Image (spheres, rainbow, N blue to C red):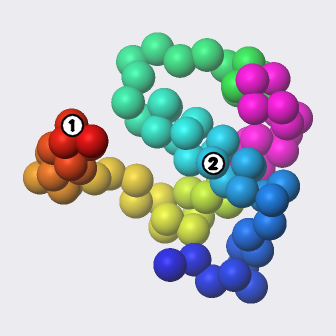
Amino acid sequence: MIDPTILPIRKISIHRIYATALLLSIKLDMDRCYCDAYYAIVFGITKDELIDLEIEMLRLFDFNVNIDENILLKYIEALNKL
């Protein structure tokens, strides 16, 4: 769990957190992706802010953004049941 003193969750920040997590997942999963400026427009924030958020989220994750294949398959299975 993220310490709220490090990353306070507010209505405006949850959008940025979600956008940053989505950007990281896109960059990890896709062979081709658009430039940061495009995603910034889509997410409604500046490119510089998106880059800062991406770096900060990577630091929070200690740059460990890989997921074990078994865990991923477990989540896919659960989602398919919905």
User: Which of the two discs, 1 and 2, sits closer to the camera?
Assistant: 1
- Considering only vertical position in the picture, is 29 above or below 11? above
Q: Which residues are magenta?
A: 41-54
Task: Check residue 18 in the rendering and tell me which mark sits there, or answer none.
Answer: 2
**Secondary-structure class at tag 1:** helix
- The residue at the point 41 percent across, 23 percent down is 30
Residue under circle 1?
Answer: 80
Q: Position of residue 63 (x, y in %)?
A: 47, 59
Q: Amino acid at mark 2?
A: Tyr
Residue at 74% in and 42% down:
51
Looking at the image, which is closer to me, 4 or 27? 4
Vertical order, 61 against 65 (above or below)? below
Q: In the picture shown, does residue 13 fall above or below 6? A: above
Q: Going by the image, does 13 lie left or right of 31? A: right
Secondary structure mainly formed by the magenta segment: helix
At x 55%, y 39%, the residue is 22
Q: Determine the image quadrant of residue 29.
A: top left
Q: Are marks 1 and 2 in contact (CB under 8 Å)?
A: no
What's the CA distance linking mark 1 and mark 2?
22 Å
Q: Residues within 10 Å of mark 1 (few under 14, many from 20)?
A: few
Whole-percent x, y for residue 75 in the image: 23, 50
Percent of width and height locating residue 77: 15, 44
Which one is nearer the viewer's eye here, 77 or 58? 77
The answer, for residue 72, to whether it is visible in the render is no
Residue 42 among those drawn in magenta: yes
Name the residue located 27 percent from the left edge and 42 percent from the top edge.
82
Residue 56 on the magenta span: no
The amino acid sitting under disc 1 is Asn
The one of 14 and 46 positioned closer to us in this rendering:
14
- Can residue 68 be seen here? The reply is yes
Q: Is residue 57 left or right of residue 65?
A: right
